[in-house]
Image (cartoon, rainbow, N blue to C red):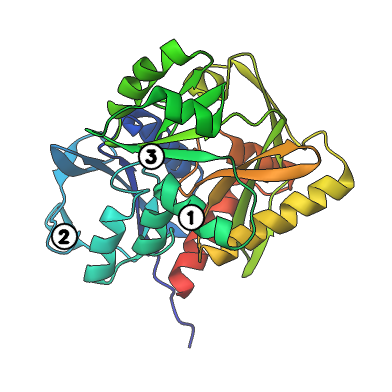
Amino acid sequence: MQTIQMKKNIAIIMGGYSSEFEISLKSGEVVYNNILKEIYNVYRVHILKEKWVLIDDFNEEIQINKHDFSVEINGTNITFDCVFNAIHGNPGEDGTILAYFDLIGLKHTSAPFYQMALTFNKRDTLSVVKQYGVKTAISYYLNKGETINVEEIIEKVGLPCFVKPNNAGSSFGISKVKQANEMVTAIEKAYKEDTQILIESFLDGIEVTVGVLEYENKIIALPMTEIVTENEFFDYEAKYLGKSEEITPARISNEMHDKIEKLAIFVYKILNMKGFTRTEYIIVNNEPYFLEMNTVPGLTDASIIPQQAAAAGISLPALFDNAVKMALKY
């Protein structure tokens, strides 16, 4: 007697509460349009500050029951087997909503909530990787309300330097500071995104970014991308508005490629990651320096992970199907 395999119900969560919500909505739509609907029942869920709603085939909104993350459609109560996390920033990338899913026993495509919270916090991530001998820029930390000592900052990190919000993505709130009189303005800009700030020394070298994920039960690195930006750094315009050249595979030696690939997989493992990640490095004097890790990297048509997957011969349907399968096995 043949057993009929029921389709799994997959919720793609997108949106979020941060400045990245519009990018997240685009990423979520790319997942929705490419995930294998012959295998899965796929639903779009918008997680926004004012509402959690499922978007049906007619673009009508149906309220999500936050008690168990279920939804009633035409009198039928729908529960989900897995959540595909496409939320950049809060509450998807910082682990907040993933802790909720863990509490109600719902599987998802990201790492456990603590790992997500750790890697979303740039300071804490740097503290961990440094303990394993991973090279990083020189850092200076500030919390909102603390005295801003420009002279002390420059003495430690030098000029030029980068001023960054500690918890933010898509380069929101980041400034490259070239002169001392620009420092306070840059700090105020960063404080609009977060109450904690990270100020880092400028690393002058080749910037590469590499996707790492668990693919078919093995942790792999995708072909890495070299970033050549028209702007001062790889900012929002460079990432999403065509102000950069993204070259995949990166124009680096085989030896350097192997070195960064091993390092990226090593960092993925020491941070106990699962699901998609994209890690950025700067190569200075033939040494890769770790910048940061993105645990819900962009999946839009302009994003790097889809480019790297294509270079590896992995289609988007295969990539997203694998993400769900890896999530369901745990």
Residue at left offset 65%, top offset 54%:
264
Question: Considering the numbered disc 2 on the image, is that residue within a helix, a strand or a loop?
Answer: strand
Q: Which residue is mark 2?
A: 76
What's the CA distance linking mark 1 and mark 3? 13 Å
Apparent side of residue 105 relative to residue 271 in the rendered image (left or right) = left
Question: Considering the numbered disc 1 on the image, is that residue within a helix, a strand or a loop?
Answer: helix
Q: Position of residue 304 (x, y in %)?
A: 60, 36
User: Is residue 203 in view?
Assistant: yes
Upstream in sequence: badge 2 or badge 3 = 2
Q: Position of residue 54 (x, y in %)?
A: 23, 45
Q: Residues within 10 Å of mark 2 (few under 14, many from 20)?
A: few
* Observer-nearest of 232 and 141: 141
Question: Considering the numbered disc 3 on the image, is that residue within a helix, a strand or a loop?
Answer: loop
Task: Identify whether 243 is placed above or below 326.
Answer: above
Q: Name the kind of residue labelled 1 in the image.
A: Ser
Task: Identify whether 304 is placed above or below 63.
Answer: above
Q: Position of residue 317 (x, y in %)?
A: 57, 49
Residue at left offset 27%, top offset 54%:
96
User: Is residue 108 in view?
Assistant: no
Q: Name the kind of residue labelled 2 in the image.
A: Thr
Residue at left offset 45%, top offset 81%:
3
Upstream in sequence: badge 1 or badge 3 = 1
Q: Which residue is mark 1?
A: 127
Quarter of the image holding residue 228?
top right
Residue at left offset 15%, top offset 52%:
74
* Observer-nearest of 207 and 326: 207
Q: Residues within 10 Å of mark 3 (few under 14, many from 20)?
A: many
* Observer-nearest of 280 and 79: 280
Q: Which residue is mark 3?
A: 166
The C terminus is located in which quarter?
bottom left
